[in-house]
Image: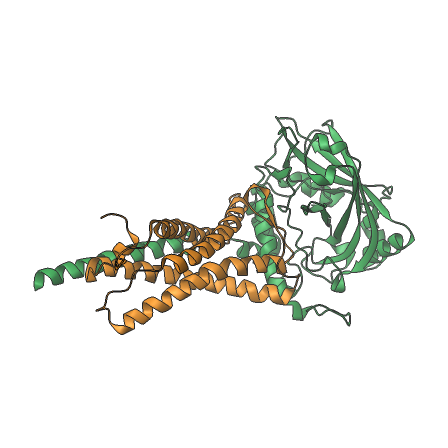
Chain colours: A green, B orange
Amino acid sequence: MPGSQRSALGSLMLIAAVVGFSVGAFAYTAGWLSPGRLSSTELVSALAPPGGPALGHRRNHAKGVCFTGTFEANGTAVALSKATVFTAGHYPVLGRFNLATADPNAADPTVRVRGVGVQISAPDNSVWRMALIDPPVFAVSTPHGFYDLLEASKSKDPEAMKGFVAAHPEFAAFGEWATKAPWTASYAEVTFNSLNAFIFTDAAGTKNAVRWSLRPETQAVPISGADFAKLGPNHLEEDITERVAKSPQRWTLVLTVADPSDPTSDPTRAWPPERRTVEAGTLVVQKIEPEVDGPCRDINFDPTILPDGIKVADDPFPAARSAAYARSYDLRTSEANHYPRTAVSAKP
Amino acid sequence: MTDIKTRFSAVQRLLHWLMAIGILAMLFIGVGMVSTIGRQYVPLLIAHKTLGIAILVLALVRLLVRSVSGAPALPADLPEPMRLAAHLSHVALYALMIGMPLIGWAMMSAAAYPIVLFGGFRLPPILPQSASLHTMLWSAHFYLAFAFFALVMVHLAAALFHGLVRRDGVLQTMLSGK
């Protein structure tokens, strides 16, 4: 019966075509057919120093120390966002002061950018996580630009960095800060900035683009890079541990509200200084603990973990950071045995 | 009544096709979101979690409905190996429909991530934070996702084989019509 055999063969070919098409679409979606697409894996790999990453540690901002404390909301920011953490009250905080380096043992004076990760929890179970750094603007305007920066700064070609700067004119403001801004000798004197813009929604549904900063209560004392280097490789952790042991250290959470004309998608462009600001409350750091057994160790300060009332804007960085932080988290938790806990009652 | 069941009930068919769309979307969203750093990452992640919980709920409802309504018998002339394959593949499909969302939920819990669904709906953690549990669950979620997709492809190919080559009425049990 050649007719029915032909028809069966046709049917089998049809089935193969349907399955083949589905598998192809799946492979395409997974990025297997587009090796040029920048993934979190490549971004995170690019962070690794030539000798490879420090296993068990964050792939960037690897050197850090944990803190716990309180966010004392004054209630003013409910005018901007319905997030529960802005209602007047005290909310528990978990955080981490850190240095923007892939080396957990880097000497403090070798790292220009400092950061802080903060988690504020509210009684309605909403959680706000953020990761802020101290430059006034970011280095590049797109996640791909950040990848280019990592590649250029690692390159053995002496022209690589020049080529990067020429291709990324937006780098100039950050470059100026990195080379000229004075240093400080304490985390307690650092202003930390979100740099990325987020959308705040109030109870009536009104939306505003907002960036924010943590402004220290402690007066900053400028110090030269050379003088800071004399204080030793781990001065920042020693200093903040000592200060907090004596008395809690405070930062004011300052929200800056954009005008409709301000750029919300480009963290290399600062908003004009006369923009409206709202002081939402005070971050009070009450206790410092080493990272190895500390509560911040296994927390991913993913900036897209937001309470109801705050959401991501058109800024491309929070999404890219979220993807990269998750990759880093997956890697370092799988390498936990390379970074063993020291406490007797350690969790696995 | 000696009515021989030749078709799944309307509710079962509706559940099947809803979940077919949901699971395929889920698998594509999953591999898509982990391979992008674009702005779509954030909404894809929320969609993935929301759809995962929806599939978990629908799968449990479906098991319940199946226990009440039953299923049409396979054709009497179906060879024993195919009968066994049909049985095992359906057990595996149900296990994955229920297991994958639970593994994902547990994995998020073990990483101390808040679990926020579409509309700001929050789920409680089902495990304490643990690096070793997170790693184990992450691997399970990752590898089982590809097994799930492969199984869906086998299921699709087998359904079409029944409908186009064997023409034994098995495909029709999940279709509407006379």
Image mark count? 0
At x 61%, y 59%, the residue is: B126
How far across and down, in percent of the image, does residue A51 sit? 63, 66
State the residue lying farthest toward the right: A246
Residue A38 seen in the figure = no
How far across and down, in percent of the image, does residue A136 sit? 71, 39
Residue B47 seen in the figure = yes
On-image quarter of the N terminus of chain B: bottom left
The quadrant holding residue A169 is top right
User: Which residue is at the front of the view, A77 or A252?
Assistant: A77
How far across and down, in percent of the image, does residue A228 sit? 83, 52
The quadrant holding residue A338 is bottom right
The quadrant holding residue B163 is bottom left
At x 77%, y 72%, the residue is: A344
Q: Is residue B50 above or below residue A62?
A: above
How far across and down, in percent of the image, does residue A232 sit? 84, 59
